[in-house]
Amino acid sequence: MKFVDEFREPEVITKTAEEIRRLADPDRHYRIMEVCGGHTHAIYRFGLKDLLSSNIELIHGPGCPVCVLPMGRIDDGLSIAQDPNVIFAAFGDMMRVPGTTGSPLEHKARGMDVRIVYSPSDALKLAKNNPDRHVMFFAIGFETTAPSTALTLVRAKEWGLHNFSVFCNHVTIIPAIRAILDSPDMRIDAFIGPGHVSTVIGCRPYEWIAKNEHKPVAVSGFEPLDILQSIVMVLRQLKAEQAMIENQYKRVVPWEGNSAALRAIAEVFELRPYFEWRGLGFISQSALRIKESYAEWDAEKRFVVPGVRVTDPKAAQCGEVLKGVLKPHQCKLFGRECTPEHPIGALMVSSEGSCAAYFNYEHRKTEMVTSISSMA
Amino acid sequence: MCLAIPGQIVELFPDQPTAAMIEVVGVRRKVDLGLLQDNLPVKGDWVLIHVGFAMSKISEEDAIDQMRMLRMLGEAEFAMEEVEGYGLEDS
Amino acid sequence: MAHGAGGKASRRLVEGLFAPLLFGAASGPLGDAAHLDFDGTKIAITTDSFVVKPLAFPGGSIGELAVNGTVNDLAVSGARAEAMVVTYVLEAGLPTPVLEAEVRAMGNAARKAGVIIAGGDTKVVEHGKADSMYITTTGIGRPIPGVNIDPKSVRPGDKIILSGPIGDHGITILLARGELDLEADLRSDTRSVLPLVEVLAKAAGPGIRWMRDPTRGGVATSLNELARDCRLGIVLSEEQLPMHDAVRGACELLGLDPLHIANEGQFLTVVAPEYAESALNALNLAPGGEEAKIIGEVREPPAGAVLVKTLYGGSRIVDMLVGDPLPRIC
């Protein structure tokens, strides 16, 4: 697989891991946050922690759109689809995420018309093919996904397709990073920047992290070598007492981002004054809503939305885990009340949530690792 | 937070300027090129695909550069250590 | 109820409800078929219901699956299928040619697998009360002499062999549904694995400890069940997992783990280390077993987990599948 396999080459991985060992000061503890849930998933999937010494701690950041979505939003979206004329379309990621009355998949089992789509454009196609029904696309995602939703809405308007709407939950990453850095119990040495968000927004939006907060950032790809090289980059900066934005993922990320994608966002969306994040609370200007000129396709304007607010169970310590204060297994509910099958907290609901990733890939592993060194 | 993977453009459609058939090791899907309209890719180009949209053209040159740099990791330091080992650093 | 797609939920349903109420306390770990002894006459029996959408897909259809599935359940329990009875539950309004095609497919598959269809039953339910067609097959078979399947006989150091590439069936079905708008030259792997099991039995009979066909929930779910039943750990090496390119491509694109994808024509076996080489050689020489591989081995700690080792020394735990494999974009 081109542009994938070469970045999984064992020999180079070993070499890069050695370089990390050489660069890391054994007397220092490094806390590096990978902002993006995709990185969290890759770190566990490829077992990259096994290649790092214990003084390099990877903190899993807020970049998982499913995890940070408040339960009330799911309830609101599902309440619209109670109307039998409405088809609820969403990405597979959303299907098992619980609302107070169950997940979309559970509602489907009870008779709701719930469809999994791979692309917002597939949801639009669904509307085209079902002219007598209304298709509501439950949109989630950061700046990577927002342009696709935007372009889909542009197409809906162009085609005059009126039986389609979007329930918009798009969020933006920079305010979330700021919220984490502003938190008093936070100590992070450097960031691994979200590569795929950066294909859209470019590298400039991170500059304040280097300039004002004096933290190195490496905008990173998602293959093992990408992540390891990014760790090399930030360790070199820390060693040289520098703080700048480096683009590790040059093959994909243009420094200035994607102008057409940014235009599509600007055409359709505007910032919400504030939005609630699960585990982080209300963050100002951290999410997108649909502009007045596209109101007809805005599910929140077209339908009566109850505006449900559900507070997370007090015992779940998602916020602390999200900020890296606690590790997933240190939460009181981890692996007991809260599991991927029955998630209570935000971070257990998506396979990229740090708790679910930890549960699926890491849980029980430590005891095993010692026994496998001689595997044939 | 976003799963996106490289695919190669194997077919363009003259009647649909913003659509392309892409292939990911034997799996094909029609994707939307609308987000690359400032710099439309051509057949044979590699693009990064997310939720059925091409997000970015992938630069082979940068990929090769990256691998070259990674393969050289540590070698510069080794060279320095070797030089130092021969006691030549003062010469 | 979300107990459909194999994995944890269905195991809990069986262990928590059916086993205690129906099978009594005497039953051991749940196998693919029951082996019974009637005054010295030994038979194996199993039953399975088939629900698949679409009914026909590249490489097979529900009628063929219903035969192969039951033949395979018997085969991996160490028995040769001899006869089966079938039940069709039909939704009123199902077009006759569709039904005819499936009955024909079932007949062909039975002849190919060398199993007699000894009887059957049909029920028609109201339109909307079933999804086109469900088939239940119950098969009986004769134990293959010298083969004894028991997860409790599995020992650390035993080797795990997989009969061929994984994921073809599950990905074929996913694409055939058409919702994802993906195309690939893939076919379901549905087939009887009995010929390969017989080859294995001949080459390594006394060394065979365990077999399973990794259908719903995939290889990961079958091996997790084994790990739990034998209270040992399973270690797989990722680069040894046989897989077609298109399965890999689809899994990368949709964020799925190939280890969780269903198969309908493969089996897993655990063999004693001294038999591993002869077992593998025999399988590789047999038609349809060319791509068989040793994919890992049994280790002592920790009880009940499956670990996958990557090429460069990393590792991850692979759990049973929770529910259906869903494509993800994050």
Image (cartoon, rainbow, N blue to C red):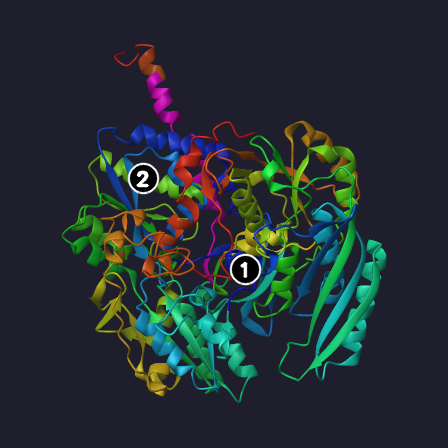
Q: Secondary structure beneath disc 2?
A: helix
The answer as to whether the residues below labels 1 and 2 share one chain is no
C237 magenta-colored: no
Q: Residue furthest bottom?
A: A132
Looking at numbered disc 2 in the image, what kind of residue is underneath it?
Met
Q: Which mark is residue C10?
A: 1
Q: Which mark is residue A233?
A: 2
Task: Using the rendered view, name the quadrant where residue A170 is placed.
Answer: bottom left
Question: Callout 2 environment at 10 Å: few (<14), some (14 to 19), or many (20+)?
Answer: many
Please state, as top left, top right, bottom left or bottom right, where the C terminus of chain C lies in the image: bottom left
Q: Position of residue C209 (x, y in %)?
A: 65, 38
Task: Using the rendered view, name the quadrant where residue C189 is placed.
Answer: bottom right
**Which range of residues does the magenta coloring cover?**
B54-81
Q: Is residue C60 left or right of residue B47?
A: right
Looking at numbered disc 1 in the image, what kind of residue is underneath it?
Ser
Q: How many marks?
A: 2
